[in-house]
Image (tube, helix red, strand yellow):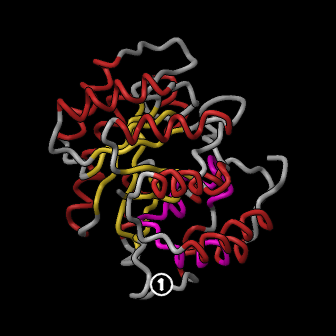
Amino acid sequence: MKVVECSRDAMQGIEAFIPTADKVRYLNQLLKVGFDVIDFGSFVSPKAIPQMKDTSTVISQLELNKSSISRLLAIVANTRGAKDACSYDAISYIGFPLSISETFQRRNTNKSIPEALNELGAIRDVCSRTGKQLVVYISMGFGNPYGDPYHADLVTSFVDIVQTLGADTISLADTVGVSTPKTIHDLFTSIRTTFPKADLGVHLHSTAGSTLEKIEAAYRAGCTRLEGALRGYGGCPMADDELIGNLATEQIVNFLDSQGVNSSIDKAELARALKLADEIFPRHE
């Protein structure tokens, strides 16, 4: 089971700028916890996501050493961002959001879906040349609020396309928190059956009250890559008027413990990270 901590997603929708020193302090603590992957920052336009404008400065100050098993992931929206991210040896994964909703694709990357697919092909080439792994997020993978077409078969067709384009990992993303335990279980089971060799995960958004049941639904469906953010912070600022938070990573860890799933999480360091999150993150974002 891979546990992905999405500190970037936790931070990006916060309007008040989090000082670079605080981001560095927080990420350095996360590196001690033992997450498989840390989605730490993004190489996108600072006009679009001002909170992430210091990603290059942040990565230069991280305490990266062989004692941490965590690998870094950075989000990009175009080939230029991918080239910037791939220039850092410390970054192992490049994440690209591809939406099945035309409305959201334009809101998120200012591109149509065909244009985004062309961009994805170019990003794949950059990753191949630099030895990075490509993670593609199927955004609005459980529905959208815009009235754009949605059906499970449409998700399947997008997974097929991105596999053909060379994605190493595919994450089904519930960008606005519309999924239910049933839709999570049914969709993930269907995709996993259709693409048994694919490296599949989920990136779900949720209210606090439905977090645990969504985690369990993904786990029961055979998901082996779960993404969250400590305390459930976050949400996509490009998706809707109101942010829907991430799955709380500590609840993911607790659930896996309850199922007897071994993980590399250091509970003492996790407790320190939670305390630091409470200190750094605004209370009412």
Report the residue marked by disc 1.
Answer: 64
Q: Secondary structure at mark 1?
A: loop
Give residue 113's position: percent from left, percent from top. Answer: 37, 29
Where residue 278 sits in the image (x, y, percent)? Answer: 77, 63
Say which quarter of the image contains residue 102: top left
* Whether residue 179 is situated above or below residue 94 in the rendered picture: above
Q: Quadrant of the N terminus?
A: bottom left
Residues drawn in magenta: 25-52
Q: Amino acid at mark 1?
A: Leu
- In the image: residue 141, left or right of residue 133: right
Q: Residues within 10 Å of mark 1 (few under 14, many from 20)?
A: some
- Say which residue appears at 26% left-offset and 31% top-offset: 191
Q: Is residue 259 magenta?
A: no
Query: Which residue is painted at 23% across and 69% down in the image?
Result: 131
Name the outermost residue toward the right: 284
Residue displayed at 36% across by 78% down:
89
Relative image position of residue 25 (x, y in whole percent): 67, 78
Judged left or right of residue 9, residue 162 is left
Viewer-proximal residue among 97 and 247 = 247
